């Protein structure tokens, strides 16, 4: 069952009212969408993963337009669906618990699965292709940049020695290292996922589009799950002070009670602003 992260805080900062229009750019299982609907608003729900989109569509929710596409096409999607006067836009970034637990695409190092890691199954790049065909310098760069992995050089040498790598367990074995507080494969898996799905560049591209889509007084809420995403969001708001009244001086995080029920909330950070 999908549990939307920071639901109470999302509703507080989006402040949805009856008949207003909102865009959920990462609809997933529809948790945040349903919460917005309960306030009487309308939702344009965008979901890239076609398997999750099928589940979302099957819910047949009233006052929802569901679209199987990437949020990178935000402005185009809104225009094509005649979805104007937008009072709020929500991004709940990163992978979903469904993708981790049920997709079979190799998002987790805890299951032996093919090294895919694509959100969009029509995408042309897989994690298997990255680990087996990218050069040593390219792999070191993404591990250092996207995984903030201080042992990147050592790990990449091990990866190259272990080629061909087909599954998640093959990759975990190649990475090696001792189990500490953080699993030694954590940062490598994060880096590969970000590279395969172009997550950071997509976020950098879409944030300025929110200014074109939001109505004056419209609200932007972004939930990120690691420092790289949060830095992009923070800098966007900082550089858009003439366009946004920033509502969160510091990122909003989950309360202990929520974290106990939903571990994903542990690393969630919410930032929000109102379009001037």
Image (cartoon, rainbow, N blue to C red):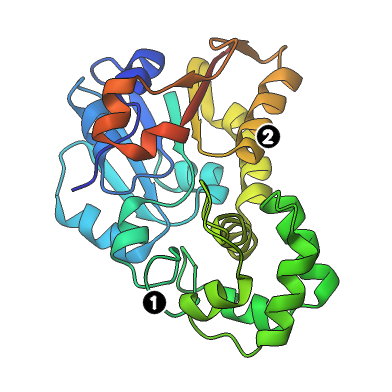
For marks 2 and 1, the one nearer the N-term is 1
Q: How crowded is the residue under tag 1: few (<14 C-alpha within 10 Å), some, or many (20+)?
A: some
Q: Which mark is residue 232?
A: 2
Q: Quadrant of the C terminus?
A: top right
Residue 269 horizontal/vertical position (percent): 50, 27
**Disc 1 designates what residue?**
112
Residue 183 horizontal/vertical position (percent): 52, 55
Q: Disc 2 or disc 1, which is closer to the eye?
A: 1
- On the picture, is 125 further left or further right than 137? left
- On the picture, is 182 further left or further right than 69? right
> What SS does tag 1 mark?
loop
> What SS does tag 2 mark?
helix
Q: Which mark is residue 15?
A: none
Observer-nearest residue: 244 or 183?
A: 183
**Rendering quarter of residue 232:** top right
Residue at figure coordinates x 21%, y 58% from the top left? 55
Please tell me whether residue 100 is drawn above or below residue 136 in the rendered image. above
Count of labels shown?
Answer: 2
The span from disc 2 to disc 1 (Cα, nearest Å) is 33 Å
Residue at figure coordinates x 35%, y 13% from the top left? 12
- On the picture, is 122 further left or further right than 250? left
Residue at figure coordinates x 33%, y 21% from the top left? 256
Residue 220 horizontal/vertical position (percent): 50, 24
Residue 126 appears in the picture as rendered: no
Residue at figure coordinates x 14%, y 49% from the top left? 60
Residue 245 horizontal/vertical position (percent): 60, 9
Observer-nearest residue: 80 or 180?
A: 180
Residue 217 appears in the picture as rendered: yes
In the image, farthest residue toward the right: 137
**Rendering quarter of residue 7:** top left
């Amino acid at each position: 069952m999908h549990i939307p992260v920071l639901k109470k805080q999302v509703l507080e900062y989006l402040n949805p009212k009856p008949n207003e229009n909102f865009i959920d750019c990462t609809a997933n299982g529809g948790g945040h969408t349903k919460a917005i609907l309960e306030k009487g608003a309308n939702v344009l729900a965008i979901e890239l993963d076609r398997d999750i989109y099928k589940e979302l569509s099957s819910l047949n929710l009233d006052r929802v337009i569901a679209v199987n596409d990437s949020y990178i096409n935000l402005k185009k999607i809104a225009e094509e669906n005649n979805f104007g006067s937008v009072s709020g836009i929500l991004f709940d970034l990163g992978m979903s618990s469904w993708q981790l637990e049920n997709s079979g695409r190799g998002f987790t190092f805890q299951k032996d699965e093919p090294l895919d890691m694509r959100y969009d199954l029509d995408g042309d790049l897989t994690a298997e292709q990255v680990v087996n065909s990218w050069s040593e310098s390219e792999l070191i760069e993404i591990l250092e940049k996207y995984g903030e992995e201080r042992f990147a050089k050592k790990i990449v040498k091990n990866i190259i020695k272990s080629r061909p790598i087909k599954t998640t367990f093959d990759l975990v074995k190649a990475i090696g290292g001792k189990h500490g507080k953080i699993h030694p494969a954590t940062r490598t898996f994060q880096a590969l996922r970000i590279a395969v799905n172009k997550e950071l560049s997509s976020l950098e591209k879409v944030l300025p589009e929110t200014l074109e889509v939001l109505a004056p007084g419209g609200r932007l809420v972004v939930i990120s799950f690691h420092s790289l995403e949060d830095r992009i969001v923070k800098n966007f708001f900082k550089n858009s002070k003439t366009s946004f009244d920033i509502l969160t001086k510091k990122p909003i995080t989950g309360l202990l009670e929520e974290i106990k029920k939903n571990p994903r909330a542990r690393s969630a950070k919410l930032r929000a602003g109102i379009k001037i």
